Image (cartoon, rainbow, N blue to C red):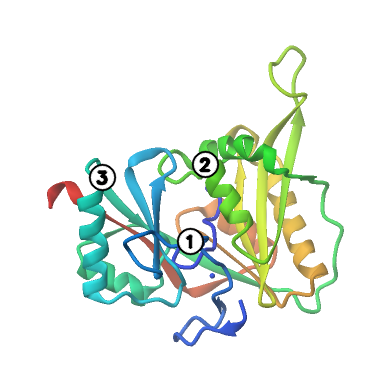
């Protein structure tokens, strides 16, 4: 199943409630991008796409930002002028108001994400199935899991996963491992799934969840999601949020079985083909 996108501002999201209508389920500024991109200003961050250097990922610095048309045009022209091999600009997940500005600039929708929310207050903390700590030295292994689950177009590399872990003031990173068969090369235990969760402003975020295809439908995704929810409840967070593709029926079914309810609002991922400009 496709794992959820990270809940970053401007994609996959602290202290003050966002004032933008319809964003009552997020905290403005809760999740931070680590630094802005030189030449583009503090409202946006750009980095190469993990597994395709011709694609850049453009993420708004906060989910409440709605770029001005002139500002967005300047970002695009700067990227085209400074990256001669650039073919595609792909956004993070956008709320509708920001997405409309990107449409006006020629971007098209390439993915639509459902938002889901679960209320945590008053729920008993149930011991989840066993998971293991995901250490930073395992980020490379986790990126291989992510790539197998997402494919090259949507996967995160090790640096992306490190950024996801530190996008909120508190986080939890857990993995599921299976024992390798006798004679199989590699470490004794193989990482087959992982989850990264964050907490900020009294809210929880299931930032990333991935399971390799050959070990899906074995309970690993459910175990990791249950662990994340138990961690959020122990921290006395009010609710948890996750997103996933609207076409990802297995993921939607999993989250709904765990108490998540789909919200009316959806997020859009957009991209611009700059080779025709």
Q: Is residue 263 left or right of residue 130?
A: left
Residue 83 horizontal/vertical position (percent): 26, 46
> Residue 33 versus residue 149: which sits nearer the camera?
33
Q: Quarter holding the N terminus?
A: top right
Distance from disc 2 to disc 1, alpha carbons, whole Å, reads 18 Å
Q: Is residue 140 left or right of residue 5?
A: right
Q: Which residue: 40% across, 69% down?
A: 42
Distance from disc 3 to disc 2, alpha carbons, whole Å, reads 19 Å
Query: Quick check: can you spot residue 190?
Result: yes
Distance from disc 1 to disc 3, alpha carbons, whole Å, reads 21 Å
Q: Quadrant of residue 65?
A: bottom left
Pointers 2 and 1 in contact (C-beta within 8 Å): no
Q: Quadrant of residue 256?
A: bottom right
Q: Quadrant of residue 230?
A: bottom right
The residue singled out by tag 3 in the image is: 86
Packing grade of label 1 (10 A; few <14, some 14-19, many >=20) is few
- Per the image, label 3 sits on a secondary structure element best described as loop
The residue singled out by tag 2 in the image is: 157
The residue singled out by tag 1 in the image is: 35
The residue lying furthest to the left in this view is 277
> Which of the two discs, 2 and 1, labels the residue nearer the N terminus?
1
Pointers 1 and 3 in contact (C-beta within 8 Å): no
Residue 98 horizontal/vertical position (percent): 34, 73
């Amino acid at each position: 199943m496709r794992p959820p996108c990270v809940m970053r501002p401007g994609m996959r999201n602290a202290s003050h409630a966002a004032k933008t209508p319809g964003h009552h389920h997020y905290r403005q500024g809760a999740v931070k991008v680590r630094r802005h991109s030189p030449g583009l200003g503090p409202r946006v961050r750009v980095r190469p796409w993990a597994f395709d250097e011709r694609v850049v990922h453009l993420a708004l610095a906060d989910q409440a930002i709605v770029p001005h048309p002139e500002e967005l045009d300047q970002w695009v022209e700067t990227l085209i002028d400074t990256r001669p091999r650039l073919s595609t600009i792909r956004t993070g997940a956008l709320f509708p108001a920001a997405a409309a500005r990107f449409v006006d600039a020629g971007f098209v929708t390439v993915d639509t994400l459902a938002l889901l929310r679960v209320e945590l207050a008053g729920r008993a903390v149930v011991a989840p199935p066993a998971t293991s700590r995901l250490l930073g030295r395992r980020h490379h292994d986790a990126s291989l899991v992510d790539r197998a689950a997402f494919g090259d177009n949507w996967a995160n590399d090790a640096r992306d996963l490190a950024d996801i872990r530190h996008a909120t003031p508190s986080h939890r990173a857990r993995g599921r491992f299976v024992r390798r068969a006798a004679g199989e090369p590699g470490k004794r235990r193989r990482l087959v799934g992982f989850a990264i969760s964050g907490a900020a402003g009294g809210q929880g975020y299931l930032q990333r969840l991935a399971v390799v295809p050959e070990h899906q439908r074995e309970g690993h995704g459910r175990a990791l999601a249950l662990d994340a929810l138990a961690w959020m409840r122990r921290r006395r967070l009010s609710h948890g949020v996750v997103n996933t593709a609207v076409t990802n029926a297995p993921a939607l079914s999993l989250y709904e079985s765990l108490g998540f309810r789909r919200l009316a609002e959806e997020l859009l991922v957009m991209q611009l083909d700059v080779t025709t400009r």
